[in-house]
Image (tube, rainbow, N blue to C red):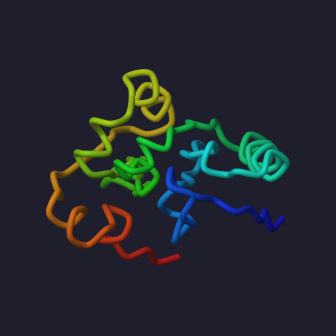
Amino acid sequence: ELVTFHSTDTRGNPVYHTNVMMAIGTDVAIVCAESVVDDNQRKHLLARLRATHEVVEITQGQMAALCGNALELENGHGLPVMSMSTQAYNAFTPEQRAVLRRHCADLVHAPIDTLERIGGGSVRCTLAEIF
């Protein structure tokens, strides 16, 4: 099912790419629901995500710290790991990290501050996905 919505940052500018405000793994989803300004769109998005995933809601501030730009990968043992920047890792609360750890064997992060500051993207933007 296609779920459409409009998402904005704290200044009201449209979020330029969905992976800035949302990351969907196998069993867990990270989403900045508060960036979806329309109440009905926000409720529908959360309902659809919650039907199949445990949802970690992030704030606009966490979205700005690129928490939504995480990417689930598979480690050498075939287990899911959630990759993110160190900035994003530090922006997640301990409770949010605990939820992510329930669904992933590990949370891996790297300090890519220069790429984030100059390039505007984070870990997901630097990794290619092949499906």
Say above or below: 46 vs 118: above
> Which is nearer the eye, 103 or 46?
46
Residue 82 shown left or right of residue 54 in the figure: left
> Which is nearer the eye, 99 or 89?
89
Q: Position of residue 43 (x, y in %)?
A: 80, 43
Residue furthest out toward the front:
11
- Residue under the point 41% across and 42% down: 62
Q: Position of residue 92 (x, y in %)?
A: 38, 34
Residue furthest out toward the top:
95
- Residue under the point 57% across and 58% down: 12
Where residue 120 sits, quadrant-wise, is bottom left
- Residue under the point 57% across and 54% down: 24
Residue 42 shown left or right of residue 124 in the figure: right
Say above or below: 123 vs 60: below
Q: Position of residue 21 (x, y in %)?
A: 52, 55
> Which is nearer the eye, 35 or 23?
35
Q: Position of residue 80 (x, y in %)?
A: 43, 48
> Which is nearer the eye, 16 or 48?
16
Q: Split into 4 quadrants, where in the image is the N terminus?
A: bottom right
Question: How many numbered discs?
Answer: 0
Say above or below: 95 vs 36: above
- Residue under the point 43% across and 25% down: 98
Where residue 114 sits, quadrant-wise, is bottom left
Where residue 126 sits, quadrant-wise, is bottom left
